[in-house]
């Protein structure tokens, strides 16, 4: 497998990930993926689960995260960890950006 070490922002396409959410896939390999998501106020990341580990860093804005039935308000500088299989989602309270890190990569995002 050829490994890509450099990912230029101008080459990372954006994709509409649902009403009010835009996802940009940044650096990734088979074992790791970084994505930047932009949420409009009121946009919802619906409750879901997946077999990947996931960390989220809040770059800007305010979000109400629900993780395993517990709701918490988070803002710039805060972060989360979601283990495989845990039910989680978020509602954007104030327009902002998230940085999501997945292990392994989300192949479904590349399709």
Image (cartoon, rainbow, N blue to C red):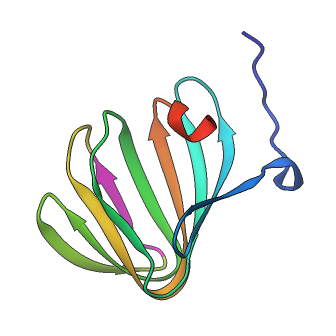
Q: Residue at x 20, y 52 (%)?
A: 87
Q: Vertically, is 16 above or below 29?
A: below
Quarter placement of the C terminus: top right
Name the image quarter holding residue 30.
Answer: top right
Q: Position of residue 63 (x, y in %)?
A: 38, 79
Q: How many marks?
A: 0
Question: In what quadrant of the picture does the N terminus appear?
Answer: top right
On the image, the x and y values in percent for residue 33 come to: 57, 39
Q: In the displayed orientation, state which residue is furthest to the front.
A: 19
Residue 4's image quarter?
Answer: top right
| Residue 63 sits above or below residue 47 on the image | below
Considering only vertical position in the picture, is 40 above or below 81? Answer: below
Q: Is residue 106 visible?
A: no
- Residue ranking furthest to the top: 1
Q: Position of residue 5 (x, y in %)?
A: 78, 30
Magenta segment boundaries in residue numbering: 77-82
Nearer to me, 18 or 51: 18
Query: Residue at image x 33%, y 64%?
Result: 46
Q: Residue at x 20, y 47 (%)?
A: 86
Q: Main secondary structure of the magenta part?
A: strand
Q: Is residue 41 highlighted in magenta?
A: no
x then y, percent, for residue 78: 40, 72
Q: Nearer the viewer, residue 86 or 81?
A: 86
Q: Residue at x 11, y 64 (%)?
A: 69
Answer yes or no: is residue 92 visible.
yes
Q: Is 75 left, or right, of 33 in this rendering?
A: left
Instruction: Determine whether 110 is above or below 63 in the image.
Output: above
| Left or right of 92 on screen, residue 71 | left
Quick check: is 79 in the magenta stretch? yes
């Amino acid at each position: 497998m050829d490994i890509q070490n450099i990912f230029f922002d101008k080459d990372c396409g954006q994709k509409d990930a649902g009403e009010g959410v835009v996802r940009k896939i940044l650096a990734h390999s088979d074992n790791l993926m970084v994505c930047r998501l932009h949420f409009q106020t009121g946009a919802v990341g619906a409750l879901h689960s997946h077999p990947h580990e996931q960390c989220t860093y809040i770059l800007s804005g305010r979000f109400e995260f629900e993780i395993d039935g517990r709701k918490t308000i988070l803002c710039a500088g805060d972060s989360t960890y979601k283990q495989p299989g845990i039910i989680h989602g978020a509602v954007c309270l104030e327009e902002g950006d998230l940085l999501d890190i997945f292990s392994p990569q989300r192949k479904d995002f590349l399709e």
